[in-house]
Image: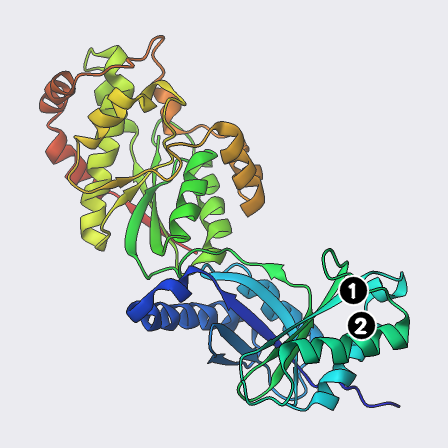
């Protein structure tokens, strides 16, 4: 039996905008490495995560299988802050060892079996290595051409062999998995998402995770006038999103009686905006209690009557915390495409009886006046009501 030249399986991670962070870069890298370790811990694979210049390497223990390395690569592909994840092989820093590994890697590929066009791309991070990048390209590329007769195509190859010379070893790999990009979760603080159970709010939550926010989720249920279906749906969405950040928490507010009070206030056309303001006030109270610094909604400008510019302004007026709206300039097609990509669309499209169905006036106000809304809130004693609602929340742990 011939001994493999491919050395040890490992995972090589490429960083995105973190590399532009200057003096703060180390803080972001520490957060990212912590998130990576938390993500792969449940896999039960002992790993050694090491920082390199511009990359992070995950080394597996001796005797680890390629399948275990694949599982680690697939898991960390969901960790924001990474742009590429490569299933690589760790090779000794010797030109002959690198040559043999490149030949074996190509020989095992499906592309080589069908005569694919190929290229070799080398990068020498350690300048002490005896061969320059272009010399390494020619050495390995020439051997592949001689051994397998594959045509070279430097512009549009179907198969690319990557060789990266690092401080202590050489990484050899082909292909990779696109990462989530963005910043490490937790590097920008904590925020609270108003999770409706529809298509928009899960996407908004994901987009803000990618900007470094660790988010908790607040769902308003129509209980006792609706069933628990919307809670189950919100819970399923949070579970789906949890793979991007971990340690997610879902809070549920029984909102039905408050909605009934709004309905009987006699301001039918303002009911939806009055409800939104009360939700935001309640969310702000909860945010203060869990030390979140902002609120997040899935609002998109002009998508529905409550999301006109005038009505958005009226909602902002209800609270002092900043309201982040990452989808404000998106259209529904773009939001649905993103929901499909992150795996939340199918859950969001499940039928449920949410709290918004309790307030559906024939004509909703598109240019609500803040003073009119404040009069409704005065009659409802909204400041006290939002505290009572915050007191009534229930936590659902994953």
Q: Is 66 drawn above or below residue 326 in the view shown?
A: below
Disc 1 vs disc 2: Cβ atoms closer than 8 Å? yes
Question: Is residue 29 visible to the viewer in this orientation of the structure?
Answer: yes
**Closest to the observer: 119 or 255?**
119
* Quarter assignment of residue 314: top left
10 Å crowding of disc 2: few (<14), some (14-19), many (20+): many
Marks 1 and 2, how far apart in space?
9 Å
Q: Quadrant of the N terminus?
A: bottom right
**Closest to the observer: 101 or 227?**
101
The coloring applied to the image is rainbow
Query: Residue sitting at 18 percent across and 49 percent down?
Result: 288
Find disc 1 in the rendering and name its residue: 118
Q: Is 157 drawn above or below residue 268 in the view shown?
A: below
| Residue 341 position in % (x across, y down) | 57, 44
Query: Residue sitting at 21 percent across and 12 percent down?
Result: 267
Q: Quadrant of the C terminus?
A: bottom left
Query: Residue sitting at 34 percent across and 64 percent down?
Result: 21
**Closest to the observer: 309 or 155?**
155
Per the rendering, the mark at residue 106 is: 2
């Amino acid at each position: 039996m011939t001994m493999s030249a491919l050395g040890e399986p490992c995972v090589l991670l490429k960083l995105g905008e973190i590399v532009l962070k200057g003096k703060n870069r180390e803080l972001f890298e520490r957060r990212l490495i912590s998130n990576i370790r938390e993500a792969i811990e449940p896999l039960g694979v002992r790993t050694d995560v090491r920082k390199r210049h511009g990359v992070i390497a995950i080394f597996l223990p001796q005797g680890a299988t390629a399948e275990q390395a694949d599982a680690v690569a697939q898991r960390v592909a969901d960790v924001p802050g990474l742009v590429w994840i490569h299933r690589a092989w760790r090779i000794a820093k010797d030109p002959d060892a690198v040559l043999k590994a490149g030949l074996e890697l190509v020989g095992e590929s499906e592309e080589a079996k069908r005569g694919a066009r190929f290229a070799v791309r080398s990068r020498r991070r350690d300048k002490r290595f005896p061969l320059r990048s272009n010399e390494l390209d020619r050495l390995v590329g020439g051997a592949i051409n001689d051994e397998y007769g594959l045509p070279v195509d430097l512009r549009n190859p179907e198969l690319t062999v990557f060789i990266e010379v690092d401080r202590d070893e050489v990484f050899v790999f082909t292909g990779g998995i696109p990462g989530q990009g963005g910043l490490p979760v937790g590097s920008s603080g904590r925020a609270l998402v108003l999770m409706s159970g529809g298509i928009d709010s899960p996407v908004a939550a994901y987009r803000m995770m990618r900007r470094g926010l660790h988010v908790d989720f607040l769902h308003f249920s129509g209980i006792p006038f609706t069933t628990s279906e919307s809670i189950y749906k919100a819970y399923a969405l949070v579970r789906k999103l949890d793979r991007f950040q971990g340690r997610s928490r879902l809070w549920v507010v029984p909102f039905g009686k408050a909605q009934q009070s709004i309905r009987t206030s006699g301001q039918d056309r303002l009911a939806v905006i009055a409800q939104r303001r009360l939700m935001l006030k309640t969310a702000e109270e909860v945010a203060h209690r869990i030390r979140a610094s902002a609120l997040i909604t899935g609002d998109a400008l002009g998508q529905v009557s409550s999301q006109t510019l005038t009505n958005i302004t009226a909602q902002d007026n209800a609270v002092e915390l900043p309201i982040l709206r990452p989808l404000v300039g998106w259209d529904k097609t773009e939001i649905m495409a993103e929901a499909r990509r992150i795996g939340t669309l199918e859950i969001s499209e499940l039928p449920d009886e949410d709290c918004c169905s309790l307030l559906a006036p024939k004509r909703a106000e598109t240019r609500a006046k803040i003073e009119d809304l404040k009069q409704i809130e005065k009659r409802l004693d909204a400041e006290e009501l939002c505290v009572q609602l915050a007191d009534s929340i229930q936590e659902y742990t994953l």
